[in-house]
Every structure is written in structure tokens, then in C-alpha cells.
Amino acid sequence: ETHTVTCSAPVNIAVIKYWGKRDEELVLPVNSSLSVTLNQDQLRTVTTVSVSRKFQKDRIWVNNREESMENPRLKRLLAEVRRLTKEQGSMSGNGTRPPSHDCHMHICSENNFPTAAGLASSAAGYACLAYTLCQLYHLQVDVSLLARQGSGSACRSVYGGFVKWEMGEREDGSDSIAVQVAPESHWLELEVLILVVSSEKKAVSSTRGMQTTVKTSPLMKYRCETVVPQRMETMERAIVERDFPSFARLTMQDSNQFHAVCLDSYPPILYLNDTSKRVMQLVTAYNKLHQEERVAYTFDAGPNAVLYCLRETMSELISLVTHYFPPTPGNERNYIRGISSEDCRTDSDFTKKLKLTFDPTPGLLQYIIRTSVGDGPRLLTQP
Ligand code: DP6
């Protein structure tokens, strides 16, 4: 008998960044973090897991290529699922028996967006795997606890909307879990524009980069002990009150400080490139013009920008971005994803009308994606 379940999970983008572990094995962080879950129409992972007595060994395919099962995080996640399955016996939610813990699994995982593009693919990937395994084995556990052990940021992708990851204090990690701050319906006006600067694999992985920072950055101690605890509270309040200017300012400040502790590491870690910095300057000039925060940028461990704004600002933002970062000739058709043509009336007089002064050196972007806040993992088939 073969049991098969297919699920999907979203990407999340942190507005208060997770950076640094206090336990590498259990993936326990040195600070709490908070993120926005993105709409699965544009960015998601779909994972199918099959279990059968006929399978000779565990196997995994990611984006149609078979990968090694020797990945320690993956192995630990599967071992944990089998341990829990054995422990919970054949309990079940809907009368059907879960598969046995001693059968092998075939895992097939696919993104609807390029992997390793610095687009949080590991977050969606591990959240999806953890969620799918919980469905398949009828596990009565906190899914975020399992997802976390695959990749820290993945624990926040197990809920939609606005999600915090409480760092917790226990040594076994049982209180290091994700909690939803507000569902996606809470702030439907909040929208997202992703500027893909480069889809190359990053030079320093998050896992390695944060080790260097924890070991060597004197600024990091101040960030974890003093800055982040305050920002978590202020950010949560800004979201609950739908206070966009506060949300935006904190988001940019925390992205800046994350990249500052990277630079403060030794050897230094640099994720931003010239295009990223031009995006920061453009957003800063735009906000200054309006004398309030209307757009926020944030950057993870790579040069790609994620911009947040309210729906009423989006068409102006798209015009601004496509004006200063025009597509390279030949790339026009591929350039804009999820954006209707009426949003994208590129008006040559537009920036003059806006009276925005910004150095017009053309920047280079590969493409941009318009999206919004989205829901959590979905069960796509019945077990
Ligand atoms: C900059 O979750 O990828 O995106 O736990 O080692 O797998 P591991 O790291 P990962 O780190 C993400 C770092 C970040 C900030 C964030 O998402 O909070």
C-alpha cells in the first residue's frame, strides 16, 4: 500500500530579521524575528511525499533533480517525524491509519520560482515538507517546531499573514515556535513588489554567514540584547494598528542593521550590491518627497529587494521602479510578473511630475514580481 500527500507552502520575508543561532543542531536563534507571508500564486513550493513498503530507500527530488539524502538537516527532520510517528502510534484524525514509521519515503518538491535566487526558497521548502509530513503521518505536533529544524526561517512559513518566531529560552527548543500575529485578512491593503537583481546563488550561505557574525561581530550583542526585543514589540503594534509609516521605518531600519552586523563580521559579509544600494536610495528619496514613509525596502542574504507599500501607492511605485530600472532590450516581456498593463503605464513625464531628484544612471534588474500578503500551507490532496 502506498500513501501519498501533496501540499503547498508560501515564502515569507522577514521585517525583523533572524540572524544567528544559539544551537546549531536544533536551529535555535539568538533573537526573535517577524515576517510577512507572501501570496502563493506568485511564490510557493509544492511537495508530494509517498510512503510505501516497496521503496528500497528514502529519496528526494527538488525541482526535478534527485538530491542527496545526506543533508544533515533533512535527515534530522525525517528521523524526528519517524520518532513522533512511532511514539504516537496509529492515532488518526479521520479514521484512516497513518503509514508505518519503518517504510521509506519518496519526496518530490517543486518551486514555482527560481531556487537559490535569494527568494527564501528554503523557507517555503522546509515548511512545505514539515507540513506535508504532518498531514501524511497525522502528527499532533506544532508544525513550526519541525519546520524550524529544517531551516530557521521556515518555521514562519507555516502560517499566513504576519508571523513571529519567538526565540524561546528552553534548551530543548520546545518554546522556539512560530505564532501568528495577525491573519492575511487583517491588512489586505499591504502589497509587495520584489525586485530580482540577481538570480545567482549567494556567495555566503545564511547558515555560514550567521555563524561568522555570532563569533566575530561586537555589534551583534547589542542588536540581540537591546535592539530586537524593543523592535519586536513596536513592530507587532504597528501591524496590529495598520500603521504603515511605523511598519516601514522599522522594516528598513532592521534590514539596515542586519546588513550592518554582516559588515561588522570578520571576514566581512556583503550581500548588497550597487543596484541594491540604488534601490535603497530611490525609496529614501521617494519617502522624503512625501515627507512620510510610503514604501519600505528589505534585503535578505542577497542583493534582491523586497518592497512593501499600500495598494494606493503601488502603481506609482511600479512606474518609479520601471523608470529608473528599465528592462534591458529584449527582456521587456519577461520583466514584469503579476502586474497588469494598466499598472505599468510608463509615462516619460512621470518623474518630472513627481519632482523627484534621483541620479538617473540606469540600474539593472532581472525582473519584478508584484504580490501581496498570503495564507499558510494548503493540503492539496486527501491522504
Ligand atoms: C537573512 O533560515 O536560511 O533571511 O536557519 O541556517 O537555514 P538557517 O538560515 P535561514 O536564514 C534566513 C536569514 C534571513 C533573515 C530571515 O529570514 O529572518
Image (cartoon, rainbow, N blue to C red):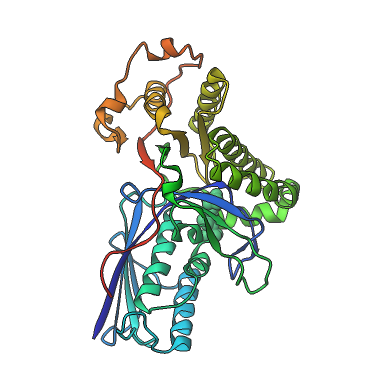
Of residue 356 and residue 275, the one placed in the foreground of this image is 356
Q: Is residue 199 left or right of residue 141?
A: left
Q: Position of residue 189 (x, y in %)?
A: 42, 37
The residue that appears at 50% across and 69% down in the rendered structure is 73
The residue that appears at 26% across and 32% down in the rendered structure is 340
Can I make out residue 205 in this image?
no
Q: Position of residue 35 (x, y in %)?
A: 52, 50
The residue that appears at 59% across and 70% down in the rendered structure is 25
Of residue 70 and residue 6, the one placed in the foreground of this image is 6
Q: Position of residue 176 (x, y in %)?
A: 60, 65
- The quarter of the picture where the C terminus appears is bottom left
Q: Position of residue 262 (x, y in %)?
A: 63, 45
Q: Is residue 27 left or right of residue 218?
A: left
Can I make out residue 99 in this image?
yes
Of residue 239 and residue 145, the one placed in the foreground of this image is 239
Occupied quadrant, residue 250: top right
Q: Quadrant of ligand 1?
A: bottom right
The residue that appears at 55% across and 28% down in the rendered structure is 293
Of residue 250 and residue 187, the one placed in the foreground of this image is 187
